[in-house]
Amino acid sequence: MSNRDKTPLSADEWDELNFPRPAENDFDRVVERALNRRGFLRGVLAFGSGAAVMGTLSPRAALASTVSRFPFTPIDAQTDATVHVPAGYRWQVMARWGDALFSDAAGYDLAEGGALAASNRIFGENTDGMEVFSHHGHELIAVNHEYTNNGTNLPAAQDGTPANADDVRKLQNLQGVTVMEITEGTNGWAIAVDSPFNRRIDHNTPMQLVGPAAGHALLQTAADASGTRPLGTLNNCGSGKTPWGTYLTCEENFNGYFGATGDMPADEVVAAGYTRYGIGTDGFGYDYHKWDARFDVSANPNEPHRHGWVVEIDPANPASTPVKHTGLGRFKHENAEVVVARDGRIVVYMGDDERGEFLYKFVSNGVYTPGGATEGLLDDGQLYAARFNDDGTGEWLALTPEATG
């Protein structure tokens, strides 16, 4: 198992333990200060008697008044090991970890850890964000696979620690994104095995970096002097869906995959970035760096900079190259909610998974036209960070070179 498997720490707790940050601007502290200010109470009273009446409701009554607007009867909290849905709804298993996307991967044996050759031709592990797409009569789903349980996938390894390059490659194959077609039959919805739309995107899939940071010296490596052709997408958390029908997958705690077999980089800019993002000598215990030099920062100090982006995937074109959009910023992306503004510009709202970090929005310079060109809409624009005040108000701050230094 990985070091994270051996302890109950979340990714946030791991980072906070190893890379503590000042807490005075933590969002929880901002909320706490707002709640303690007289201005907050005045703001609540300004809503008038209606707010006062609402304030007398019990939590249960307040919840009931909210959920009653939904077209179903809410279910009570449950503690058993099954799925509960409201009356009038049903659920079914559509895809399970290890289910084949292609017939040559049928029979993937989870109990034995599965075969390396089939590990990127099956439905991956530990799902997170997902979106559904309808394409000319085909129903497609894109699903994130955030991380692996090493002890299960490497049962022969000591404590699930990779013992060789093949072990690492298997873990890399099992993560990333699944794109698959689903069809409805007599037993419900299921994977359309061998569909031409089926695809696995993993830690070694060729990608393209675009936008304002593409080609920057900090994105260049010995294997990619252009700084525009990274490999793989890491720790895929939440997701988004564009109006033009593409999938956005969000790279979250990418720092945990890197480590060092030698000295950490001495360059001040690189070292400061490592501290900010929580990149250390051991990572989360995946041990990629011991068997894959790309993840060894003592050999490839710029490789971590090529991760931490929002990645766009075209589910309808399995031959397309996934695109990392640097215009949407580099951080531990939790999600990417895309909205078309009234004037036609694209707005993307994003959160940072790290506790106490920021909320962001990106506003495109260009206007979206249905059926028109979309190139640049996720890179040519302005990125903002939200600043919250103690009185409960806030503002969007443009992240310009002048403002950020």
Image: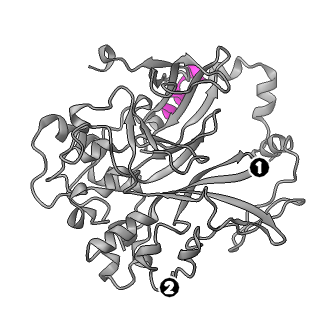
Q: Residue at x 44, y 31 (%)?
A: 328
Front residue of this view, candidates 2 and 189: 189
Residue at 56% across, 23% down: 392
Q: Nearer the viewer, residue 378 or 281?
A: 378
Residue displayed at 65% across by 32% down: 243
**193 over 204 or under it: above or below:** below
Residue 42 position (above or below residue 78)? above
| The N terminus lies in quadrant | bottom left
* Disc marking residue 145: none
Residue 113 falls in image quadrant:
bottom left
Q: Which residue is mark 1?
A: 137
Residue situated in front as seen by the camera: 373 or 154:
373
Q: Position of residue 306 (x, y in %)?
A: 31, 43
Q: Amino acid at mark 2?
A: Ala
376 in the magenta segment? no
Q: Is residue 305 visible?
A: yes
- 381 left or right, relative to 300: right
Q: Which residues are magenta?
A: 30-40
Within the magenta stretch, is there residue 36? yes
Q: Is residue 370 above or below residue 60?
A: above
